[in-house]
């Protein structure tokens, strides 16, 4: 669900397909998670890349692998 919410901007992206909508609906029922609540949590974090130097971003990625 998180990948779909992120990739489709919670189904608002112009590239969102009817299949995306149906799949997210099904997944939300299975997971018992509201997609809007999940989207709010995901997008509230923002992008750490906005505040990092390129060196910090590379170093941080290597640490998480």
Image: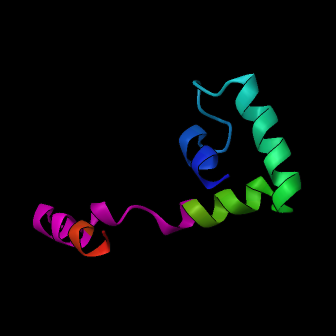
Position of residue 43 measured from the top left corner of the image (x, y, whole percent):
55, 59
Using the rendered view, name the quadrant where residue 24 is placed. top right
Residue at the limit of the structure toward the front, as seen here: 65
> Which one is nearer the viewer's eye here, 31 or 54?
31
Question: Does residue 14 appear to the left or right of 46 in the view shown?
Answer: right
Question: Does residue 47 appear to the left or right of 18 in the view shown?
Answer: left
Q: How is the image coloured?
A: rainbow
- The answer to whether residue 64 is above or below residue 24 is below
**Residue drawn 81% across the image and 33% down it:** 22
Residue at the limit of the structure toward the left, as seen here: 55
Using the rendered view, name the quadrant where residue 55 is placed. bottom left
Q: How many marks?
A: 0
Residue at the limit of the structure toward the bottom, as seen here: 63
Position of residue 38 measured from the top left corner of the image (x, y, whole percent):
69, 61
Instruction: Please name the predominant secondary structure of the magenta segment in the image.
Output: helix
- The answer to whether residue 32 is above or below residue 10 is below
Question: Does residue 29 appear to the left or right of 9 in the view shown?
Answer: right
- The answer to whether residue 14 is above or below residue 48 is above
The question of residue 59 being in magenta is answered with yes
- The answer to whether residue 11 is above or below residue 33 is above
**Residue drawn 75% across the image and 24% down it:** 18
Image: magenta residue range: 43-60
**Residue drawn 24% across the image and 72% down it:** 60
> Quarter of the image containing the C terminus?
bottom left
Question: Does residue 20 appear to the left or right of 56 in the view shown?
Answer: right
> Which one is nearer the viewer's eye here, 20 or 15?
20
> Which one is nearer the viewer's eye here, 14 or 4?
4
Position of residue 57 measured from the top left corner of the image (x, y, whole percent):
21, 65
**Residue drawn 76% across the image and 54% down it:** 35
């Amino acid at each position: 669900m998180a990948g779909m919410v992120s990739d489709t901007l919670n189904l608002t992206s112009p590239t969102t397909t009817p299949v995306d909508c149906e799949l997210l609906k099904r997944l939300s029922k299975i997971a018992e998670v509201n997609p809007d609540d999940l989207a709010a949590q995901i997008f509230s974090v923002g992008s750490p890349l906005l505040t990092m130097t390129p060196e910090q971003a590379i170093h941080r990625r290597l640490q998480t692998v």
